[in-house]
Each structure stands twice: as C-alpha cells, then as structure tokens.
Amino acid sequence: MKVELIHIHKHFGAVHANNDINLTVESGKIQGILGENGAGKSTLMKILSGYIQADSGEIRLDGTPVKISSPSDAIRMGIGMLHQDPLDFPPMRVVDNLLIGQDGGLFPNRREVVRAFNELQSQFGFSIDPYAYVDTLTVGERQQLEILRLLWLGARVLILDEPTTGISASQKEKLFETLRKLAAQGMSVIFVSHKLEDVEFLCDRIAVFRKGELVGEVDPPYVTDELVKLMFGRVISLEEKRRYETCDVSFHLDHVTIEDYRLQIRDINLTVSCGEVIGLAGMEGSGQVQFLRTCAGLIRPVAGEINLGGRRLTGKPYRAFLEAGIAYVPASRMEEGLIPGLSLTEHFILAEEQNGFFINFDKALATTRQRIEDFNIKGTPVSTVESLSGGNQQRALLAMLRQPVNLLLLEHPTRGLDIESAIWIWGKLKERCKQGTSIIFTSADLEEILQYSDRILVFYGGKVSPPLDAESTTVEQLGQLIGGKGF
C-alpha cells in the first residue's frame, strides 16, 4: 500500500511537533525515519496510525484521501503500529491477547485461533507458545506477538517505533529478517529509529527529521557522517574516556546469592570504589536486572552480605537502602519510574523531601524550572510526563535524583536515546562520579558498556564472571563471554 503524508502540521501548545511534513512511502519498501529524540518522528507515526490527529494536512492511501480518527480506523484501513512499549496485556495468555477486541461472541473458538496463529507464525519461523502468559515472554517475543497480531488484523502498512530497543542481537537479526519478508510480500514497512547502524543496514530509503521538520531524504549508499549532520546539524563525537574511582570502598557484596522463579545467581563477590562505574553485560534474562534490584533493596538475597560505606544493609527494607544513599533508575520509565497523568512539578514535589504539613508550591515551581534548565528538558512545569519524548523522560528521571547519591543503579540508562542525548546523559552521570558517586548499570549496547565502564561483569544463565578491566576488553571478548564461552 502506498502511503502519502501531505503538509502535515501538529502543535502541542507552543511546540510545533510536525511542521509541514511531506513524505511518501512506496509499497514493498522499508522506509527509515531517522531523527534525534523529540524530532517529531513518533508524533507523525501516531497521526498515521490514528492515535492523535493532525492540526492540518492530508493522508492518502493508494492515492485516495482518508480520514483516520482512531487506531481502529487505521487498522480497518490496513495500518498497524508497533509502539516502543508493547500494547499487550502481560497477565493474560498469548491467545487471549489475540482475541481481545475481536468479534466472536462470549465463547470464541480458541482451538481454531491457535491453529491459525501457529500457521501464521510458522511463516516467519517464530515459536511462541499460544498458551504462555505474556509476562513470561522476552521483549523480542512480545514484539513478535505484536507483529503477528497486527498481521492477524489485516495490516498492510506496518509502523515500528524504535523496535530494536531492549532486544538482543539475535532477536534483532530475526526481526530484520521478518521485516524483509513482509516487504517482499508487498507490505509497506516504516522503521522509526535514532540508531544509524540499524536504518543504514535495513532501510531502502531514509527520511531524516530535526526539530519537527523533514530536513532530508537519502538513498543508499548511506554515509554516516552525512546522516549525523542532517540529524543534529553538526558532527557528534564521543568524549575522551575518564576514570574517577578512588581507593575508598563504597559498596561491597560478600558471597551474595539471589534466587527467583527463573534462575539462581550464586556466590557474588564485588567491591566497588567511590566514583567507579561497573557495567553489566549479558543476554536479556541472564540475571542483570535481579542483581541491580538486589543492590537497590527491592529483592532480598537468600545468602550473603550487602554493605555500603561500612553500613550493613542485608535484610533491611527498601527505605533503608534509600536512606543510605542508593538510588535506582528502572528501564520501564512509565511503568516504574514516572507516574502518568502527573506534571513535572508534581513529580519534583514527590521526589523532594518535604518539610512541614503543607506543600510550598512556589518553591516547587522554582525547583522545577531550575531542573528543566539544568537538565535541558524539553517541557514546561505543567507538562505531563507522558507528553515528553523518551529522552526527556530519562532526563526528568535523572533530575529527580536527590543529592547526594552514594550508589546509582541504572537499568539501560540510554535505551531509546539518540547519540547526542546519550552523550549528554553520560556527561551528567560522570559529573556524579567526580563527586564520589559509584554507578552500576546494565545495557544491551556493548559499545556503551566498553566506553563508560571502568570494570565489567558478564552474566550468563545465572553465572557471573570475575570483574574485567574495560580498557583491555574488546567487543569480541565480551561477545564470547555473553554467549557462555569462557565461563
């Protein structure tokens, strides 16, 4: 299906999110949409998929003007969107997620649905158990489920918004293989990303957005520096690597064992110095998240000792970890880190320690304005957090951290962020290291782990490697360990 977006405009208050966008996507092609966080990519795709409506402009499908007022309108017209956060129901089974919203009365024929589902997924080499609960699936499997659900509903235009965020290299390879098959079948695929290597490798054509405008369209062969200049108006380069660790011990784990229903991590020993950065590498589900949550006091170890600055925290409640100066920033910003519906000001009120019975709103407003300026958040004190881009949500989370922080635990700190935002985030984090804060973080990006870590722990099936010096470790060596070789 050929898609034409003509003179699309969209405002959010004073922000001109889409400024006179003209874009054509041909049938059977994979169209890349590249741009920094907040460039207007997701806004345009939400207009095309019916989640929001344009202020002005026209959409044509195969040359026919259409009005898309809702996601149900879009899917009836053959347009489906895979969002950054899967729109599924984790407590329900896969088959029930397929049936939601479908005609079929009170007693749908589940056996027939399962048969058709297995037939559909076999075309792409997927192997999802239709009776599995969605919350037991990996991020990659949930993506596969969402793609199958959209195809099930009759999608002929498939929009994917930052689909490689949070999935492993093998899952990404499978996703790309699937998208190429769909394009070969005549579908139009729109691939929205800030990751240069992904769009360069996959897409037949790339449209680049900057500050709400379409600033250029590029055909292969692609030149990375030219794409970067289009995205940011200048070339972006990584800062020189700096280490700030001291001899003072900040955090210590002694023979810690962690258990949950999926895996057991035995006998972890780690000493972290003040100002040191520890990176956690490994396939998704290998134990990194459980490790971080144990360090944060959200999971209690079944054995071993946890100490921060000589203070014993073993068995203490989460609040004791907070009071000791341990802060945890989760990957699920809108599910665990922020509260949908509340403004930035209300978030800073909740994050700051309150004195007295009444809230000083004037002081809270002044604090919010200062944090917005300090952390370069593209929003206002009254902006709700869900109205912010992913990069600005991440900035808001960091801006909410109290001072001082002795140990900062980060789950995918730059997930979904463009190059410039990622460099900026790490600049702020390294400032904390300079002040003595220790950092432990996990990331699916091996280059990020090598660039910003002082030492690295590799997780594989519940096993943990001895700490590796980041400067003398290569991507190839990390890859071998992540695959289980060398344990």
Image (cartoon, grey):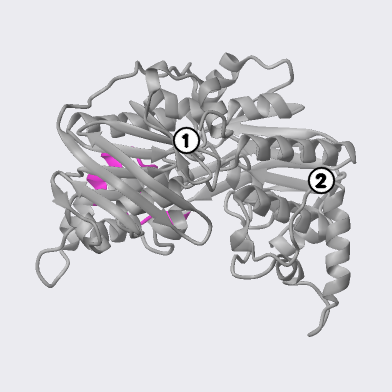
Q: Is residue 127 magenta?
A: no
The disc, 1 or 2, on the residue closer to the chain's N-terminal end is 2
Side (left or right) of 338 relative to 347: right
Q: Position of residue 413 (x, y in %)?
A: 41, 40
- Magenta stretch bounds: 368-386
Q: Quadrant of residue 231?
A: top right
> Which structural element holds mark 2?
loop
User: Which residue is at the front of the view, 33 or 140?
Assistant: 140
Q: Position of residue 108 (x, y in %)?
A: 82, 79
Check disc 2: other Cα within 10 Å, few if <14, some if 14-19, many if 20+: few
Residue in view at x 34 percent, y 53 percent: 294
As displayed, is residue 424 above or below residue 103?
A: above
Residue in view at x 43 percent, y 29 percent: 449
The residue carrying mark 1 is 281
Residue in view at x 65 percent, y 54 percent: 142
The residue carrying mark 2 is 125
- Res 375 seen here: no
User: Which residue is at the front of the view, 417 or 55?
Assistant: 417
